[in-house]
Amino acid sequence: MAKTNAIGLTKADYKGAPSTLCQGCGHNSILSQIISALFEMNVVPEDVAKFSGIGCSSKAPTYMLSRSFGFNGLHGRMPPLATGALVADPTIKGIGMSGDGDTASIGMGHFKHIIRRNVPLVYIVANNGVYGLTKGQFSATADKGLRLKRQGENPYMPIDICMEALASNATFVARTFAGDPKQVKTLLKAAYHHKGLAVIDIISPCVTFNNQPESRYSYSWAKDHEAALHQIDFVPPREEIWLDKGMEPGEARTIRLHDGSAIVLKQVAADYDPTDRFGAIKAIEESYAQNVLLTGLLYIDPEAPNLYEILNLPDEPLNRLTPDRLRPTPEQLAEVNASLFGA
Amino acid sequence: MSESLSQPASAAARSEVVNDFSITVGTINGTGSQTSNLTILRALFKMGIPVSGKNLFPSNIQGLPTWYTIRVSKEGFIARRDRHEIVVAMNPATIDDDLAMLMPGGAFFYADHLRPRQMRDDVVAYPMPARKLARESGAPPKLRDYVANMVYVGVLAHMLGIDLEAIHEALRYHFHGKASATDLNFKVVQMAAEWAAENLEKQDPFRVEPMEATRGLILEDGNEALALGALFGGLQFLAWYPITPASSVAETINQYIPKLRRDPVTKKHTVASIQAEDELAAINMAIGAGWAGLRAMTSTSGPGISLMAEAVGLAYYAEVPVVLVDVQRVGPSTGLPTRTQQGDITFTYFLSHGDTEHIMLFPANINEAFEYGWRALDIAERLQAPIFVLMDLDLGMNHWMGQPFEYPDQPMDRGKVLWEEDLKKWAEEGRRWCRYEDVDGDGVPYRTVMGNRYPGAAYFTRGTGHDECARYSEDPDVWVRINQRIKKKYHLGRKYLPKPVLDTMDDAQVGIIAYGSTDPAIVEARHILLHEHHLPTDYLRVRAVPFHDEVGDFIAAHEVVYVVEANRDGQMAQLLRMAYPELAGRIVSHSRSDGLPLTAEWVVSGIQK
Ligand SMILES: Cc1ncc(C[n+]2csc(CCOP(=O)(O)OP(=O)(O)O)c2C)c(N)n1
Ligand code: SF4
Ligand SMILES: [Mg+2]
């Protein structure tokens, strides 16, 4: 019998249609980590909504959470689509799945602006440095100098998703690698419990178009060069935080999220402070100089108000308000009429 | 002291012209002249005289010439006119043009620091000491340009007989009862009126007299009307990006949310309003919201509609309710963005790639703007489709007389939405729910919305490529079936749209079809055709696309039907010929796009007498 979680569901309850992505595609590993994370956190699938743009990465939501509402929208437009939808019901958590083309090119403006609005959404960029679905063109995150079949050499500097997020004052910024499933899963859990927008840039190799060893987006390069900032644990709400045996309290840093859950970072990189935005930017810059793939929770501000608070919306779902709460009264119209310029 | 000239004076004395003329004011953009012009308009309206005001303004914040035309009409004709009986010139850059547009025998008021190159001798000219009075008013220097524009209000008040108390009320309204601003401006008006009484001798024939024709009416612009209508329609989500002439739709909504849409239970707001980063975002947000069960709207103009094309196709095929307000203007790019046009008819009708045809509503006055503000939300949810409300700059931004707004006469129609208890009932009755199944034979499927926790309520939405149960499918037969069902929904959905309005005359053989803001010009043109050319006409004002059967019947019943509209290519005529190919020979397009609201004279000019 399949293992059940605390709410009596099996992993199958979190799955979707069988994946049609290529065997070995990084996006598939991300999918299984999303499924595991939600299963382990005992999330009710009906409490989640999935959103995506267009691309192989954006197809991924079909292959998970068939019990959740989902909307596969337009190329680059996942952020506004999710924004509009999530306003309808604050009891729903959004998971947005995008690609590097979807986010860093056609949807770059929306990416920056959904960050400003701090929409309660886990914003995953499955980043492979290439356009998968349109068969292997350079994306805006591709390395300068990368050579691809039929594309020649990329003459442009890449865009760094995390850097862009930090520049826009994102309240949760993380980078991870599809080949590091444990870290992916833990960051997903933390992102899910973050009150606002959580950007996770996941290096997710495209085995068909951009997996040659010299590419920063290949499994082999990422594996060989991954430099994790810290070891990261997620402690769900109402659970006690236990530190590993023999560990001093000072060696770990606990970040409380709004719902009582916590992120525990056990220091690997010395003195990294994930609440220091400037420090995060500096760390990313340095990672390029050191030629490493820096992963982990780069930055977090767990308290910043999210879109619901900014818009002053009721706590209950807006889409369930009855007409009597939506249509002002005839007396109110009479007042409006009286206030207009009449003869 | 007036530089009056011999011969018109005697002519003036002979025949007075009461409550039947146009006043056109030429000023400099950004000098507060809008306050002065609105004050005159409102005061006349307050006196019971039918009026309309058209702001003919450049795309500019400060410095460029701008005109405002007030039509005073005892017969209630409120279309713009090309004839200018009274011209007020406050702008050195345009004074010669302003003088030239004045009709012979007209009255020319001008700031006395300006000099026309050559004064005409077939008009009456009145210089006004605008700067001097502004200085003497005690207004702080930075306000002097503004109050200088109040001088012409006072001079006109005296010379035409506009009631000063009506002006005072108009100012109080304009300044929201703020005493200091009202007093300062009114003081200048009084000073100017007194100055005119002492120094100007009336030599023109124009004056106003109180009437009772506007009692009980309001004076509003269409954008505000539509915004209020949407708030009374239970709007829950607005996303927009600033653009003239549409911005004031959203700005009005934002302004009224705290007053009208504070939840009686939680005291929080029941409308989410987001200024988006662009129109791509605005429409995608509105689609997300509509999909999730919110009454959603976006307001924009042609350039925004252009950007929304792809998303509108998505809403059409995913069957998402959403309202798009298009306050049409001339476009694209810069040049004439602040000029009016009915230029987006065919573009909007076909908007997006693939087979698409859209529902469009055409409000023709502020009361319809209010009504379609709420009704469009009902129609969108009823038909699960994007609904376009096609306004234009003339209706949206100019002040129109109308009845006080009427409370919606129908309960909110939320359409076919199934919540947990509905699905439970379906299950108990042994009925299966599938998102895109045509259960009722009207082409409109039942939908669930995000947040519905009933087992099986959730579905995955994509544009094309889904079967009746929203499962992924590229099966050719499925696609044909789904596509045809959407077409059926579109055509059967006509019954929810406002019917055309018919107005007939005895023995009319000639028909006129028009829509939207050109209505006043048509009404007046028909009057002229009847009385000056003995040509009776029938008039069908179309209020929605797709067309009701009445439209085809109307064309069939007339030998010739003129389709009158404010665009170059006769866009509505094109749609009509397409809808009624067998009647195409009777359809004559009479269209013009010059950036200005149509005049009755121009309408008459294209109709064979
Ligand atoms: C408006 C528009 N332009 C272009 C496309 C074609 N298109 C589909 S997927 C894609 C790129 C996707 O790249 P990415 O987001 O990196 O996803 P990946 O396939 O690499 O996971 C493009 C350009 C489209 N669907 N829509
Ligand atoms: S083409 Fe690349 S990105 Fe797309 S599914 Fe295959 S491996 Fe993944
Ligand atoms: Mg990619």
Image (cartoon, rainbow, N blue to C red):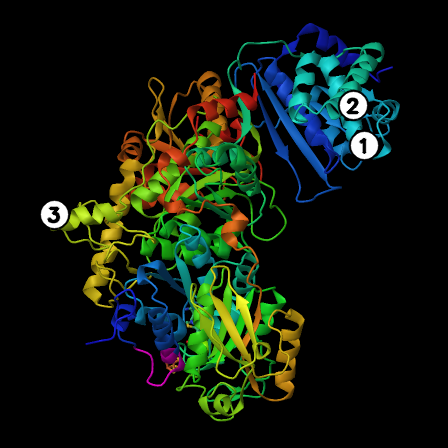
Magenta stretch bounds: A20-29
| Inter-mark Cα distance, 1 to 2 | 10 Å
| Inter-mark Cα distance, 1 to 3 | 73 Å
Say if the magenta span includes residue B87. no
Q: Is residue A82 above or below residue B152?
A: below
Dividing the picture into quarters, in which one does residue B538 lie?
top left
Residue beneath the point at 86% across and 33% down: B141
- Judged left or right of residue B87, residue B305 is left
Dividing the picture into quarters, in which one does residue A279 lie?
bottom right
Q: Is ligand 1 within 8 Å of the beta carbon of the residue shown at mark 2?
A: no
Q: Which mark is residue B143?
A: 1
Looking at the rendered structure, the kind of residue marked 2 is Leu
Chain for disc number 1: B
Viewer-nearest residue: B577 or B365: B365
List x then y, in percent, for residue B560: 35, 32
| Inter-mark Cα distance, 2 to 3 | 73 Å
Would you say the residues marked 1 and 3 are in contact, meaning their CB atoms lie under 8 Å apart?
no
Would you say the residues marked 2 and 3 are in contact, meaning their CB atoms lie under 8 Å apart?
no
Residue beneath the point at 31% across and 34% down: B551
> Is residue A125 at least partly visible in the picture?
no
Residue at the far top in the pictured view: B14
Viewer-nearest residue: B6 or A111: A111
Same chain for the residues at labels 2 and 3, yes or no? yes
What residue is disc 3 on?
A: B429
What residue is disc 2 on?
A: B184
